[in-house]
Image (cartoon, rainbow, N blue to C red):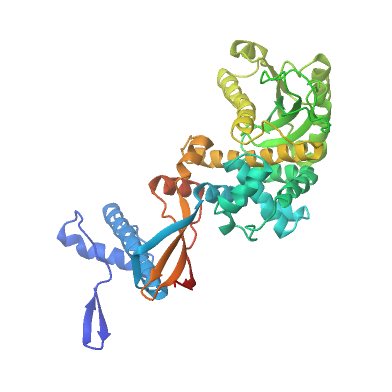
Amino acid sequence: MESVRTEKGPRQRTIMHLGSFDLPKERWKELAACLERKLSGQSTFQEEAPDIEHIATQIMEQYGRLERRREEKRSRQEHQEIVRVDTQSIVTTHTRSLGGELVAHRAWKALGLDRILKEAGMSARECALAEASVVCRLLEPGSEIGTWEWLTRGTALNELLDVNLEKIGKDGLYAIGDVLYGHKAYIEKALYEEEHRQYARGPMVYLYDLTNTFLEGEKKRNGLAARGRSKEKRSDCPLIALALVVDQRGFPVYSQIYPGNQSEPITLQAVLTRLEESLPPLLKQEKPMLVMDTGIATEENLRLMEEKGYAYTVIERREQRFLEALRTDLSAQEIWKLYMTIQRVESAFRCLKSELGLRPIYHQKTERTQAHLFISILAYHLLNWIEQQLKEAGDHRRWSTIRKTLSSHQQCTVVFRDEGDKVYHLRVFGKPESPHEDIYKKLGVPMLKNRQLTYVARRL
């Protein structure tokens, strides 16, 4: 307690409720002195008794929670807008998804994509359009027309962007894909450097593989469309091949798009050249181990890797053959760790195809096809960052599960009338439930400030 002066004379004011604790009464003074030091920010040369320190810490945590609630109440009272409302008039409209957008926006910021795109020469509007395209591919994968419909009628992402895109046209979304692909080399390099800075741990391992996906229709104007052996058993469709290098954490390092009949072995030379041109500071410090399957590891390619000084591992898609093909100087634990690491490149392809809208491709033009694939790869960067952050917090759920959990956190507009028949629109964010809060806390997602009250009209 403390004594304070009021208009009615001296009064006692409660500073802190101590609650209940197990401590003999003769030691209460010792506890009070400890709490007084903590409240005033004083320090002592002597360490507190462990039981006193434990009780005092618990009390201070409770005190902090109560103070935050008091501050929230004071803030509400300071900014409150009281209106007498006809409860029979209350309806909601313009419901928009919010949960996945908050997480995707957090990943976008954490990877420094706004900075990277601005350094590449893109405007603020182009950066916002790029984020919208990539986030939509992560949350609601589909065509550019589908992205436009989602952006204008399905998402609260506009609330998070620096530029309002509610009235964006369809052509803007096609154009931003071309712009992004035009900066592909710079974006991939800058993203890899940022991801390496955040997650560089242990020896570097690069996993290299090719996959292909199919196109709908003949696509005679698409220079990438070609008949080949489909890994999805779609011999009835023209194909496009995607070469992808990922690191041991699953982050894409480099990607290249080829015609669907591309021979796998001859791509390695171009990949190594590109890596050495794009990432020289990192590769000078340490060359990664290259991991690939037998389809790429021809005798010529093995000689090439040896000449360039790369350690390598060749695998076959059966575990026993994989173990036989490994270098013999690895321990059993290292072999198993590497085997599990190899699953990341296959996981990347699975995510790209099943969760990020890589297939099928409907574009008639080569450049639009390239842009479509690159947007999916950028979305995978966000997906992998989210899963990595959750994993470090002990949460091993996949993105598909997280996305489903977050889908129930939404934003809407509440419409109501007051006693004078004035109509109001109130934009509100749904209060996160415990499953949402758990994810937001693990990912460091900041919550948005509510709300925007707009007087619309008087009802006649």
Q: Residue 337: percent from the left, percent from the top?
A: 57, 24
25 relative to 269 in the view: left or right: left
Residue 70 seen in this snapshot: no
Residue name at image x 20 percent, y 57 percent: 20
Q: Quadrant of the C terminus?
A: bottom left
Q: Residue 446: percent from the left, percent from the top?
A: 50, 56
Spot the residue most to the left.
25
Q: Residue 248: percent from the left, percent from the top?
A: 63, 31
Which of the two residues, 100 or 345, is positioned nearer the viewer here? 100
Residue name at image x 74 percent, y 50 percent: 171
Please give the count of numbered marks on the rendered protein: 0
Q: Residue 36: percent from the left, percent from the top?
A: 31, 68
Residue name at image x 22 percent, y 85 percent: 10
Which of the two residues, 282 or 193, is positioned nearer the viewer here? 193
Quarter-of-image position of residue 342:
top right
Quarter-of-image position of residue 73:
bottom left
